[in-house]
Image: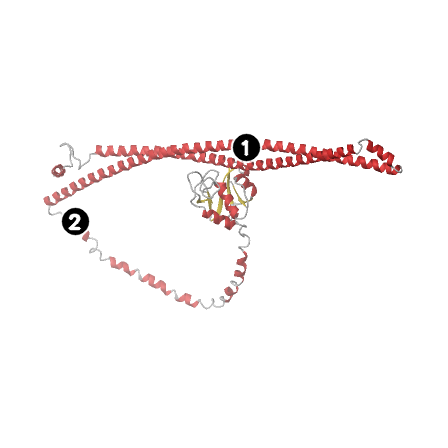
Amino acid sequence: MRNGMLAGVFATALAAGVVGPAFADPTVPTESDIQDSRDAEAAAAGDVSALEARLAELSAQVDALYIQAAKAIEAYNGARVLLEQATETEQTARAAAEQRDAEAEQARIELGRMASATYSHGGQLAGVGMVLGADDGQALYEGMGALRAVTRSQVTIAQRARDARHDADHAAAQAATALAERTTAAEQADAARAAAEAAVAGQEQAVAAVEAQRSTAIAQLAAARGTTVALEQQRQEALEAEQEELEQEQAEQDPTEPPAPTGQPSVGPPDDPTVPVEPTTPPQPTTEPSQPPQPTTEPPPPPPEPPQPTVEPSPEPTEEPEEPDPDPPADGAEAAVDYAYAQLGKPYEWGADGPGSFDCSGLTMRAWEAGGVDMPHWSVAQAQQVDRVSYSDLRPGDLIFWSDNGQASGVYHVGLYIGGGQMIHAPRPGKDVEVQDVFYWVDPSFYGRV
């Protein structure tokens, strides 16, 4: 009968045009078919696992490169800040040198005028004139002293002017040297930043390629699993049909057996007349509720107690309002947080400080600028400017720092705390300004209050 049923299924499939060669029977997959499908599924699963491991490795490398890139960009920001300072110093020193040079030139001119006037009035004969024209010795002494004082004064002024000009020229030269060094440092920082950007971009391309391979492998795995399920379902349906036909054949050959299955289900309910004896146990719980009258005799003692609780709640509310005082909001913090919220969704950009894009320290700088505090566009300098606080003491507006040495000098990323264990920050290239958990990445190094 079994062979007849399978032959019928095969004939039906053949008539429907779903069967290929005459010797194939797709309606009942063989164990070999099932095993081949399972082998394909296992192979696809292995490919996915290998690619996922490779993807995890590359992702870890990308994270490391992001940290290196963050350090490079913050070093670049720092070089720019120092370059600006050096430029201002050089300009100030150069202006001072020019001023001193003008003063020295003026002193030289004045000294020349005095010498010319002295010469026109007799030069060395002026002293002789004082001797001949003096009425007495005291007048001669005073006249010669005045002449020497004027001469010394002019000479001293000229000397001081020359010294000031020399010092100013020296300071200007030093400032120019510092400016040249800062310019070189800024150029090197810019090159390091470009190299970091290129490294990150290259690694991201590698990750994208592996992710594409992983997507293909997952699709192959899904197809393999889908095929296995289909084969298993076809096989199970064929086996169930065979089992039903066998049961029908047995029922036709032995008609005395059907009552047996019908009698078995009836054995349960009718043959249990002793079961009602068990409901006699419920009266026991009825005896237990008889105990409630006992608590009714006990309520009289509680009435004297209510006046006591009424006295206690009155002093408690007076002490509670004092608790919020120890944590007042920082000055400008609300404005800083509001500004940061307004930048959500704007893209990250190296060295940017708004208004259309930001890097990490550019965002915190502008946020606290809105809060009335000037901060440099450099996370290291920002870390040097704040007072450190613990995580348990964090308040909205505080800054969160990541450092490779635990100190301000090693800071490479900064975010703005907004409360509830969350912060707003500009994370990295390819991402937008976002709200994120404080511990979403590596743990922060320290926290600071502006």
Residue at the farthest right position: 136
Residue at 26 percent of width and 37 percent of height? 223
- Alpha carbon distance from label 2 to label 1: 98 Å
Can you identify the residue that label 2 sits on?
Answer: 261
Above or below, 399 relative to 272: above
| Mark 1 Cα-neighbour bin, 10 Å: few <14, some 14–19, many ≥20 | some
Of the image marks 2 and 1, the number of the one nearer the N terminus: 1
Any part of residue 201 in sight: yes
Residue 169 occupies quadrant: top right
On screen, residue 34 above or below 311? above
Q: Residues within 10 Å of mark 2 (few under 14, many from 20)?
A: few
Position above or below: 446 against 36: below
The quadrant of the picture occupied by the N terminus is: top left
Residue at x-position 10% and y-position 45%: 252
| Element class at badge 2 | helix
Q: Nearer the viewer, mark 2 or mark 1?
A: 1
- Apparent side of residue 230 relative to residue 189 in the rendered image (left or right): left
Foreground of the two, 303 or 446 = 446
Marks 1 and 2: in contact by CB < 8 Å?
A: no
Please, what is the three-letter code of the amino acid marked with disc 1? Thr
Where disc 1 sits, the SS reads helix
Q: Which residue is mark 1?
A: 183
Q: Amino acid at mark 2?
A: Pro
Snapshot quadrant of residue 292: bottom left
Residue 372 image offset from top left, x and y in percent: 54, 48
